[in-house]
Image (cartoon, helix red, strand yellow):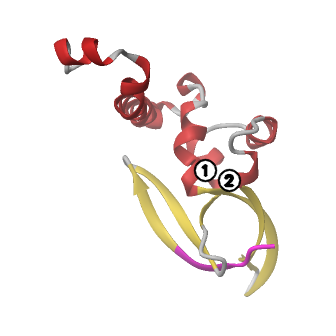
């Protein structure tokens, strides 16, 4: 089980999260915190990830310290690998996200779609088309 070694605040288009670094050199985000911040049901989202073969392996159960009364105690929580975050966001219904974060999620999804198109357009369109329409 990966161990959380360090936590740092991060900002993704105005959405405040905590990036967690593991001793195994993974960069993760607490899945419950992510869902709570966006106003999504973590149980439903967890099932969606587990059912998706592309990024099901990017969800980790990690040991982390959490405040408890006057001490810290170890707890196990689910964390999503930050590498899978863009793909997960692409599969998230922006209409279910808290209104305060909806525009940011839509903007991220539009940018990711544009990026995916730029990466793959040469594989989709014939070269002669791209010569005549370089902005396609």
Image coordinates of residue 49 in percent, x first then y, are 74, 40
Q: Are marks 1 and 2 in contact (CB under 8 Å)?
A: yes
- The disc label shown at residue 34, or none: 1
Q: Which residues are magenta?
A: 1-7
C-alpha distance separating marks 1 and 2: 5 Å
Left or right relative to 17: residue 130 = left
What residue do we see at 59% from left, 48% from top? 84
What residue do we see at 46% from left, 67% from top? 9
Residues 117 and 103: in front is 117
On the rendered image, what quadrant is the C terminus found in?
Answer: top left
As drawn, 70 above or below 54: below
Image coordinates of residue 85 in percent, x first then y, are 56, 47
As drawn, 71 above or below 32: below
Left or right relative to 91: residue 63 = right
Residues 108 and 64: in front is 108
The residue pinned by badge 2 equals 31
Is disc 1 placed on a helix, strand or loop? helix
On the rendered image, what quadrant is the N terminus found in?
Answer: bottom right
Image coordinates of residue 50 in percent, x first then y, are 80, 41
Check disc 2: other Cα within 10 Å, few if <14, some if 14-19, many if 20+: many
Residue 83: name its quadrant.
Answer: bottom right
Q: Any magenta on residue 3?
A: yes
Image coordinates of residue 29 in percent, x first then y, are 60, 59
Residues 134 and 72: in front is 134
As drawn, 76 above or below 16: below
What residue do we see at 53% from left, 26% from top? 94
Is disc 2 placed on a helix, strand or loop? helix
Residues 81 and 95: in front is 81
């Amino acid at each position: 089980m990966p161990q959380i070694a360090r936590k740092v605040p991060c900002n993704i288009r105005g959405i405040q999260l905590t990036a967690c670094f593991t001793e195994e050199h993974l960069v993760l985000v607490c899945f419950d915190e992510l869902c709570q911040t966006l106003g999504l049901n973590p149980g439903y989202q967890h099932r969606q990830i587990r059912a998706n073969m592309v990024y099901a392996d990017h969800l980790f159960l990690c040991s982390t310290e959490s405040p408890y009364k006057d001490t810290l105690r170890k707890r196990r929580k689910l964390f999503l690998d930050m590498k899978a975050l863009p793909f997960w966001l692409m599969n998230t219904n922006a209409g279910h996200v808290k209104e305060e974060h909806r525009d940011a999620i839509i903007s991220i999804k539009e940018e990711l779609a544009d990026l995916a198109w730029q990466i793959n357009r040469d594989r989709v369109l014939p070269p002669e088309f791209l010569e005549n329409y370089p902005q396609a």
